[in-house]
Image (cartoon, rainbow, N blue to C red):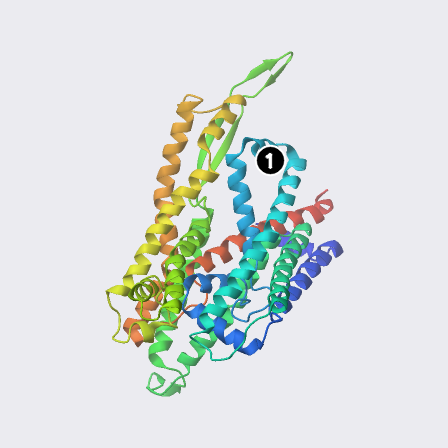
Amino acid sequence: MHFKTIFKSFKNKDMLKRIGIVIGILVVYRFLAHIPVPMGDATTFRDAMENLISRSDFGNFINLISGGGLASFSVILVGMSPYITASIITQLLTKAIPRLEELSEDGETGRRKINQWTRMLAVPLAVVQSIAYIYILFKSMGSYSTTAFEPTFHDWFLAITAMTAGSIILMWLGELITEQGIGNGISMIIFISIISQFQTTAAQIGSELFNTSSGSLSLFGWLNLPVNPTVFWILLGFGVALIIAFYFLVKVNEAQRIITINYAKRVHGNQAYGGIKSILPIKLIAAGVIPVIFATAFLSLPALVGQFITSANPDSGLGTTLTSVFTAPSAQNFETMYPNGITGQWFIYPALYFLLVVMFTYFYTSIIFNTKEIADNLQKQGGFIEGVRPGLTTAKYLDKTVVRLNFFGSLTLGFIAMIPFITDYVFIMLVGKPLGLSISGTGLLIVVTVALENLRSIDSRALMVTYDDYK
């Protein structure tokens, strides 16, 4: 990174204008996060939503990437998930349908058409998710609130329209940010959403740190600090561990296997082509955080079914079992689910979560990294890997390499996903209750990935606006 160039570019009016526009759009986004959905009493719905989130790990994750929009029952409650889902579906269909694959390879025109279809697909998905959120909320309110509220067709229509419009506005704001050329808009909105939730963890840490009911911290016997000594030393160790975790996440995100590609020399007329070397980088975690999202959604389904069964039949043992086993252990449900301390049930959800993350890492990487297609393209361009025959042998070599990388990458991603459970377990052993991180290991991975991506974009823009200074 050219940090001197980045600071120097701040003198450029165009650069400052672009940064100002991005900051203004992000302020508008955070303002939207506090506008409630126009349905009934906003306070009652907000409390019911917080109660629902505390019983669902998937709800916690959606609330995280929506910047608290789910907990506050705001118009951006649906968030970017319809557009992200539409993008994933379009990407999978592009690999499965030859016509779409040809269109994606048809330059900028084809990509624009596919992007337009992605936006159109996001609208019905936003409508469906809006209906699902409201339906689940009303089902959960039966056991939470005695407030009698029967929504009319007008209430449903107004709420669904507001939530769908909020999701589409977020998609539009993300594209406006992307047009400024200093980062991906969708990623930046998710980044700000996660960062905005840090205040929750900071408030929890502050309340525990300054709770001196069990004593204060004594420094060398002559100065007492009004802080809890146990929590202070734990937080000090946790801070050091957090710095190490950030360093580890940066290294993991940037880790890649470099494969050297040689191009055969060809003579066409009086000119020679080829005879050069290039590289093919393969990332350690090519799938990114998608496996974690898939695993969270997959594990949330049994708990959701259990809640529906319990709502219909409170005496159903199946519903109670599904809800208790497939609900992630957290600070919110620790006292109710584990009144006698940690039991064997505590480890069931984390173990299943870890296994699903590993499985989905292999699955999604196989979809986005088509080794046969890469081998065919290399063969057409006259490229080859030294010591490996072009064609099918190259595809098998790449398959073997990707499988090896996936083994370490999937275990690493699974460990990152386990950070909240490991932290809570340590805190339970030391202070008797979990910390309840609002920013999980997955959130940290997203923050690191997006921060590095945006820093590269700013670096490229800075080099462009200061190019004349180097002539």
Is residue 245 rendered to the left or right of residue 99? left
Q: Nearer the viewer, residue 178 or 387?
A: 178
The location of residue 36, given as percent across then percent down, is 60, 71
Q: Element at badge 1? A: helix
Q: Nearer the viewer, residue 77 or 312?
A: 312
Q: Residue at position x 63%, y 58% from top?
A: 170
Residue labelled with disc 1: 104
Residue 81 versus residue 94 in the image, above or below: below
Q: Nearer the viewer, residue 151 or 391?
A: 151
Q: Residue at position x 27%, y 72% from top?
A: 429
Query: Residue at the right extreme?
Result: 13
The location of residue 147, given as percent across then percent down, is 50, 80
Q: Nearer the viewer, residue 338 or 160?
A: 160
Mark 1: few/some/many CA within 10 Å (<14, 14-19, 20+) = many
Q: Is residue 184 visible in the rendered structure shown here?
A: no
Could you say which quadrant of the image residue 470 lies in? top right
Kindly identify the amino acid type of the residue bearing the numbered disc 1.
Ser
Q: Residue at position x 33%, y 78% from top?
A: 230
Look at the image and tell me in which quarter the C terminus lies.
Answer: top right
Q: Is residue 150 visible in the rendered structure shown here?
A: yes
The location of residue 202, given as percent across then percent down, is 47, 73
Is residue 109 rendered to the left or right of residue 42? right
The location of residue 312, given as percent across then percent down, is 39, 67
